[in-house]
Structures are given as C-alpha cells and as structure tokens.
Image (tube, coloured by chain):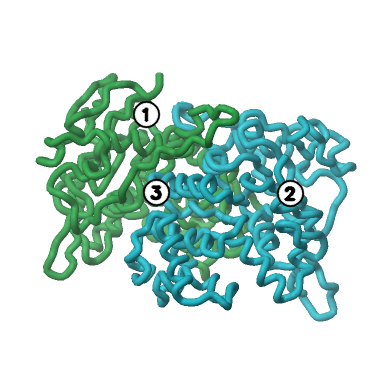
Amino acid sequence: MTRPLLQLAGMSVELSAGPSRVDIVSDVDLELNRGERLGIVGESGSGKSMTALAVMGLLPERMRVRGELSFDGRNLAGLPEAEYCRYRGRRVAMIFQEPMTALNPVKSIGAQIAEGRRLHLGETRADAETKARALLDRVGLPAPRFDLDLYPHQLSGGQRQRVMIAMAIACEPDLLIADEPTTALDVTVQAQILDLLDDLIEDTGTALLLITHDLGVVSEMTDRIAVMYAGRIIETGRTDDVFARMAHPYARGLFAASPHGAALARRQAGEARPRLNAIPGIVPDPFARPPYCSFAERCSFAEPDCRRAIPPLDLINTDGNVQHRAACFHPRARMVAP
Amino acid sequence: MSEVILKTTDLVREYQMPRPSIFSKQASLRVLHGVSVELAAGQSLGIVGESGSGKSTLARAVMGLERPQSGRVNIAGNDIYALNGADLREARKGFQAIFQDPYGSLDPRHTVRTIISEPVVSLERGIDAAARNRRIAEVLEAVGLPLASADKYPHEFSGGQRQRIAIARALITRPALIVADEPVSALDVSIQAQVLNLMMDLQEKLGLSYLFISHDLGVVRAITDRVAVMHLGRIVEEGPTGAVFDNPRHPYTQALVAAVPKPFSGRRKRVRSDAPPQTPVHTATTVTGCAYAAVCPVRQEICLTQTPIAKPVTPTWSARCHFA
C-alpha cells in the first residue's frame, strides 16, 4: 500500500495574539490519496479555510502549524519558504473563492497562466504561452474571443474563475485545493464550473480538496467529506454515508437549517409557513472555546457528560474500507434519508 | 383577494453608456424591459434571477431610488414618482429596505440607537425623544436584541445580529412593505435560518409584505408565497413559489432549478458539451424575439421572430414562452 498523498495527523494551527496562544484549528486528522475527492464542509470560523491555507503554506504571519502535515511522504510543517515555493503551484495548487481579487489586474491572463510553467518548469516564454493557449481552450475559453492578452477586468465572473482554474492546473499538480470555488457565481455558471472541475479531475487524476459551505455542492462533487465545527472535524466518512446518517447533531442541524432541508418538508395549504430549524446561539469565539464539546451549548441533545470532556472522533461504522467517524458522545442513530 | 400593497406597471429603466467619443451617438442599456409585478398586503413576493438580470434595479426603482424612464410604481395607492417632496416623505414611512451586506449597511461610527432612529428622525420630524426611545425599545424587542444593544456600535455584533439591527431600522417607521435585497446571502446557514425565521415571525405579527430579492432559490422557497423569475430585465415566469419550483414551465426557470446542486442526488450527472457556454447579454432596446432564444434548448423558428407574451398556465401562474 502506498502512502497517502496528503496526510494530516494531529495537525493544529496556532495563532499567537500577544502573550496568548490559541488553536484556530485543533487536532485534525485527514488523509487524501491520488485521484480522490475530499470535501470539507463548515461555516465561517470553523477552520476549513485555515486548514487549506496550512497545506498551501500560506498561513498568515502569526500562525504556526503543529503536528504532522505531510505531502507525498515529506513533512511540510515548518518548511522554509524557499523550499515551499517548489511545492506551491507545482505539486499543490489552489483555486480561490474571489476570482476578482485573486487575479492580478495589471497582468494579462496569458502571462498569469504561463507564469507557473516558466517559474517551475523553466519553460521559455513561447512554450509557456503555447501551453497557456491550450489551457484556455481546455477550460472553455476558446480563441479568438479569449486571447492571451486580455486582462481580468474584460472577463465576467465565471470566465475569471475559468482563468483561475487554468492557472491552477498549469503545472499539472498532484493536489488541487478549491476553496469555495463557486460561491461568488450564479447557479447556472456554478454548474458549468463544477462540470469543468469534474472533467479535469477525471482526465488528470489529480486529487481534489474541496472546501465549501454548500451541502449540495459537496454532495455532488466528493467521495468523502469532513464536517468541521469550531476548528475540529466533528464527522467524517463517505459522502453518502454521512448524508444518510448525520450522526453528529451539528451536521444534522446544519442540514435541517439549510433551505435544502426545508424544501423536503411539504407545506399544507392554509397552514402557517413552516419555520426553518435554526440552530440557536452562535459559533464560540476561538479565544473562548470551552474545554468540552464546543457544540454542547447549542445542541438540543446535550447531556451532562457533554460538558465534561472533548469528545474524540470515534468510529461509528465502516463502509467498504472507509471509516465513518463522529466526535459525539451520543451520536444519532436514526437515518435521515434512505 | 386582499388589497394590493405594491404594483409596478411596465417599468423601464435604461442606463446611459459612456460614449467612445463626443461625436458618437449616446447609447443606452435597457436593464428593465417593462416589468409589472403585484404584491398583495401581508404576502411576500420573491424575485429570483442571476446577477445582471435587473432584480436589484427593480428593488431600487420600487424604493424610489432610481426613477424609471417609464412606468409607474404604486405603493399603497400612491404613485411614488408622482408625489412631491412632503408627500413622498409621508409615503416613505410605509416602505423600508433591508440590504445585503450587514457590514457595509450600518455606519460604523454611529451607535445602534442612532442607526435605528435615523428613519424616525428624518421622516417623522415632530416626534419627541421619549416617544422615540419607546419606539427603539419596541423594535429591538421585536428583533430579539437586548435593550442594552442600543448604546453599542455595529462592530460589537456578529453578522446575524447586525442583520437584526438592519431589520429593526426598517421596522421603526411601522412600514407595511419591506424591500429586502439579498438579506441573508452574507450569513452562514445556521444564522441565515434564524434571520429568515425572524422575518417570518414579524410578517405574521405585524402583517408585513415582503418584496424579497435573492439568487438563492432555497431561501426564496422558504419565505415567499409567490415568485417572479427575472431574466435580462423581463419577468419570464411568475406564480405560486412551490408550484413554479416543482414544475417550472419556462426553459430558463427549468435551467435555473436544475442547476442548483442538491444533497442526496449523488455524484453530478454531467452534460458534456464542446460548445463554449454562452451567456446572453442585455440589449440596447427591445429586440424582436425571445431574449432567452440564444441558449434555449427548445428554441424554434418562432422564438427568433416573435417576442413571447406572458401566457397563463393557471389563473395565478404565467410564463413568457411560446411553448409554456
């Protein structure tokens, strides 16, 4: 058995603010093999984007990785910047959420796509630009309408996201991280971009780490998911299994609160409009996370032992060789869907 | 049927394009092509569409912020663009807005008290301080914020609480109509549900009407009675929300509903196409034919030559398509 491509073991991201230190991401275990698709779901402040930035080595100055973060057998935590540059863009590439701000407004799209190949692979400008042309065709921006010397402001949001994807796949990375790649886009454009990503992953066999808050997107795009809350993974397993059971009350609550869940409940004529199942309260401040289950205060199933210790990510089921785990002392047993 | 609180008639709004040179003809872009909607008192109407479909322009026109080139906006029987200053001030008490960005729409240098009381201060000049404070307490209680929040600043609140402040500001003049432009798009799912529930509670308690603008079909389904689907400045389908989303009749609505990723649907089923995706764009003025024809899967000859009119599907449901 080969080593997983990406392995996080007990990884934490630590933020130092003055004298105090706090873990933004705590004790994350994740594995990702070549060609696999893993989704990370969570709300803002759950640490999902920080996990991605940690893998990319793009954490803000005051943050530090603890624990193991290894890529292709090499521990990347604490790697000097010069060496990290050889991974970033070459072996691991990222698609950001905001195509408006992530592209350089004063460089042509051709130069931005070719940059990675010239830098990492030492290609000449001419070779790199030929490749950039081919990449633009690949992501559905054909010549002559979409020339290499266009600038980002001349493109629509969906077209810019296609350029971002072309940049990310330019050096044929082993791992593609997509952080909310379609959140800023309209649904029909979102569908086109997801189709494109799907195609590319199938063709190139790259691994995908998809970060999103949209339960629909993650369900359609991934094999496995990890649900994060307050810096920890609280449920993980095969996507179908997690959706079918939603053993952690937060996972269940998140689904019930989303309009997807509400749409399942039929409305009777003449009856009052059914309310959404909101989760009461707010996400705890990272500086004041409790020393017990961080969801206990918002959980409607909380029992006394929930306020005593942090629940470990326990095995609750195994499907094939994928484990379904949930960090809850009282995981829900009833299935939410067939 | 109850009375109509909002009625727009053939709203047309054009924007002037920059001229390439001072000798060139002034070009304009038509963003609303004769939009007519009706909202009954106590009901809510959703406007859905993609960016650039004109839904926010419609909201601004309804709020009296952008005078349309032609057409009328009637709110509670008043044509708001025909009113003079004093009458408009009086009428404005009846309709208020909630905006999308709870960070940008509250002045960071003002206390919540100043922010919330601003509509009262400017629209109801005669009111005294004691009465104003009573109104502030009343709306803060209605949106579920503690009275002590009045003396705090916006940065002390989370996104969901800020949107509650924005709702309190909209409620303070006791309006009958609230225009909400993407009010929950910036919020997380669990907080979004809290704010939507609050809006539904307030609607039942105070008999509010909502013009609810959103790109999120799920949210619109949860809160509205009727929905109007906009495409390039035209309403292409309008009807009861559940019926329209379950069984859309216009090809554009069908595409929109089909494009939403759904949990439990398993891995996506792709339609591989080699043709570059096309996006129809706004036209200068009215063109003949259907604006959606360029990308429509069921396009026929007639679609290019004749502009479709709204065809009734049922008495309360219509679609602007030759084949609806």
Task: Give the colour chain B carries in the figure.
Answer: cyan
Secondary element at image label 2: strand
Circle 3 residue: B191
The mark lying in front, picked from 1 and 2, is: 2
- Give amino acid for label 3: Ile
Tag 1–tag 3 contact (CB < 8 Å): no
**What is the chain identity of the residue bearing mark 1?**
A
Secondary element at image label 1: helix
Mark 1 and mark 3: Cα distance apart in space: 21 Å
Circle 2 residue: B37
Asked whether A5 or A263 is in front, the reply is A263
Tell me what residue is drawn at x 80 percent, y 34 percent.
Answer: B312
- Chain letter of the green region: A
Mark 1 and mark 2: Cα distance apart in space: 39 Å
Q: Is residue A144 left or right of residue A225?
A: right
- A222 over B290 or under it: above or below: above
- Give amino acid for label 1: Phe
Secondary element at image label 3: helix
- A137 over B20 or under it: above or below: above
Labels 2 and 3 within one chain: yes
Asked whether B248 or A77 is in front, the reply is B248
Mark 3: few/some/many CA within 10 Å (<14, 14-19, 20+): many
Which labelled disc corresponds to residue A243?
A: 1
Can the viewer see residue A219 in this picture?
Answer: yes
Mark 2 and mark 3: Cα distance apart in space: 30 Å
Which of the two labelled residues, at mark 2 and mark 3, occupies the earlier sequence position? Answer: 2
> Which quarter of the rendering shows the C terminus of chain A?
top left
- B192 over B74 or under it: above or below: above
Mark 1: few/some/many CA within 10 Å (<14, 14-19, 20+): many
Tell me what residue is drawn at x 34 percent, y 33 percent.
Answer: A252
Image coords of residue A212 (percent x, y): 40, 45
